[in-house]
Image (tube, grey):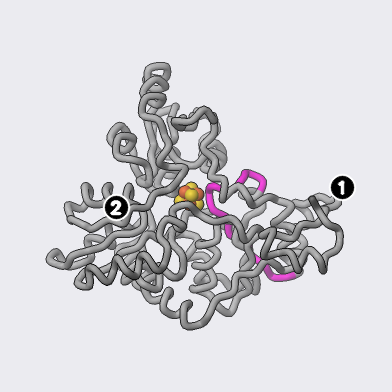
Amino acid sequence: MSVINIDSAKQNIEKNGFLDIEVDATLDLFHEIERLKKEKNAIILAHYYQEPDIQDVADYIGDSLGLAQAAEKTEADIIVFAGVHFMAETAKILNPKKKVLLPDLKAGCSLADSAPADAFREFRKQHPDHVVISYINCTAEIKAQSDIIVTSSNAALVVNSVPKDQPIIFAPDKNLGAYLIKKTGRDMLLWNGACMVHEIFSLEKITKLKIRHPKAKVLAHPECEEPILRIADYIGSTTGILKYSREDSANEYIVATETGILHQMQKDSPHKTFIPAPPTNNCACNDCPHMKLNTLEKLYLCMEYETPEILMEEELRKAAKKPIDRMLEISRAGGL
Ligand code: SF4
């Protein structure tokens, strides 16, 4: 239930994750958000999995690599991060002097949660000679225990940059790890984590869809399980999928990633048809429940009151920054 007192809403922010106050229904939130951006010199960075309204008010929409690069170089005073917690944390790690806001602190990530810091520390201890490459979808504590971070855009490039005789741990996504083993030919030790959205696509339902839409191409994110990747015509990051659908000559696509991406695909190619790949459960959608915790109202409230804010111990921030810097260096050198 919403409360109307701002002080009480601020006190309850840890419990609720956001400012639980009523927003005047007559407010034009698009206009208000634009006003706040100018007044506060704020920039909105949004992930492709955010709801369409949020993507439409964002200054930059991208995947994890693009968002990290945008967060690193922005001159704005406030970074409003419309994404999940580890992404906002990454922005704070890269640009600590900026105030980083997240519309809902509870916007987490099942993949990041699948690697608790203590258990990961024990795992590393058992393999002290391994270099640790971690997917950016992990907490700052896991980043701080890693040697290099990757995103789905640069993962193969980073894995290939490690000397051939050097053993590697890859965490936390076992599906992306298995895909990279196949793609790079490197044998890596995988942490057993997965994304709750990408591991539930149904091979059987996609195969049936392909019968009804024989010309449709399957586009998949490498977080998907191997059977889905095996039937995909294209595998790539959200940015890669978007680019492929824009430049490719087909007219129909079955898209195996979070549905938020369809908004930009449809905007870029209005004459094409994009069909969300069906999951194994009975729900017709593949929305990430964490990403979709952010709403336009919460975005407006966090800008108006400048909370919830991402804060971090400096020691942890510095340790987590090192492997991200390494990733950004390798990406730049590789032309990404
Ligand atoms: S789609 Fe998966 S990996 Fe991305 S934020 Fe949601 S749970 Fe995490």
Question: Which residues, given as a range, are shown in magenta?
Answer: 40-53
Kindly identify the amino acid type of the residue bearing the numbered disc 1.
Thr
The residue shown at (50%, 54%) is: 109
Q: Which residue position is annotated with label 2?
A: 177
Q: Position of residue 150 (x, y in %)?
A: 36, 61
Which mark, by number, is residue 207?
A: none
Q: Which residue position is annotated with label 1?
A: 26
* Disc 2: residue Cβ within 8 A of ligand 1's nearest atom: no
Image: 241 above or below 148: above
Which residue extends farthest bottom?
Answer: 315
Instruction: State which quarter of the image contains the C terminus.
Output: bottom left
Q: Is residue 233 left or right of residue 86?
A: left
Q: Nearer the viewer, residue 11 or 240?
A: 11
Picture quadrant where residue 307 is located = bottom right
Picture quadrant where residue 79 is located = bottom right
Image: 221 above or below 335: above
Q: Is residue 158 left or right of residue 18?
A: left
Q: Count neighbours of disc 2 (C-alpha within 10 A) and say few if under 14, some if 14 to 19, many if 20 or more.
A: many
| 62 within the magenta span | no
